[in-house]
Image (tube, rainbow, N blue to C red):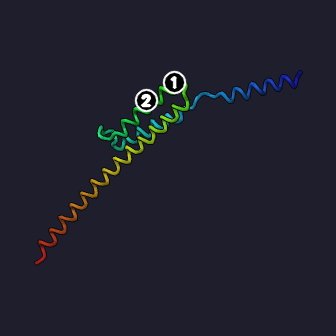
Amino acid sequence: MRTDLLLVASAVMLAACSHSPPSNEPLGVSRTAIEIARASGADDPSVGEMTLAQDKLAQAEVAARANDKVKARRLSEQAAIDAQVARSRIAAEKSRKAAAEIDASLAALREEMTRSQP
């Protein structure tokens, strides 16, 4: 009798542990990725990946509320990746602009050097 009670109690405890509430970690990661992308300047409407990231995050939140964990995780991961792509696109554009400015400065210096030589 006592052994049966211990077995039932153990089974109940294991069942309670296996039914933990759904994790919001993927949604948090996506939100953070979107905020980082925004801070880097990716909030520009010309950056389509940022819009995609925000849309997918919204869809992931709807799926999470509907308890569709697989869809919520998938959309959340896609949103984080889209936000990273948006951030990378902005960083690449800033690098291109900086390189163009350096090239222009070098060209001006070369021109000045050729003018000052007899």
Residue at label 2?
A: 58
- Which residue sits at x=71%, y=27%? 15
The kind of secondary structure element at disc 1 is helix
Picture coordinates of residue 104, whole percent (x, y): 21, 60
Q: In screen coordinates, is 112 left or right of 62?
A: left
Report the front residue among 62 and 113: 62
Q: In screen coordinates, is 16 left or right of 88?
A: right
Tell me how far mark 2 sits from mark 1, CA to CA. 11 Å
Picture coordinates of residue 31, whole percent (x, y): 45, 35
Picture coordinates of residue 91, whole percent (x, y): 35, 49
Quadrant placement of the C terminus: bottom left
Report the front residue among 94 and 65: 65
10 Å neighbourhood of mark 2: few (<14), some, or many (≥20)? Answer: some
Residue at label 1?
A: 65
Picture coordinates of residue 84, whole percent (x, y): 42, 44
The kind of secondary structure element at disc 2 is helix
- Which residue sits at x=38%, y=36%? 52
Q: In screen coordinates, is 8 left or right of 76?
A: right
10 Å neighbourhood of mark 1: few (<14), some, or many (≥20)? Answer: few
Which residue type carries mark 1?
Arg
- Which residue sits at x=51%, y=24%? 65
Quadrant placement of the N terminus: top right
In this view, 103 is above or below 92: below
Q: Residue furthest right?
A: 1
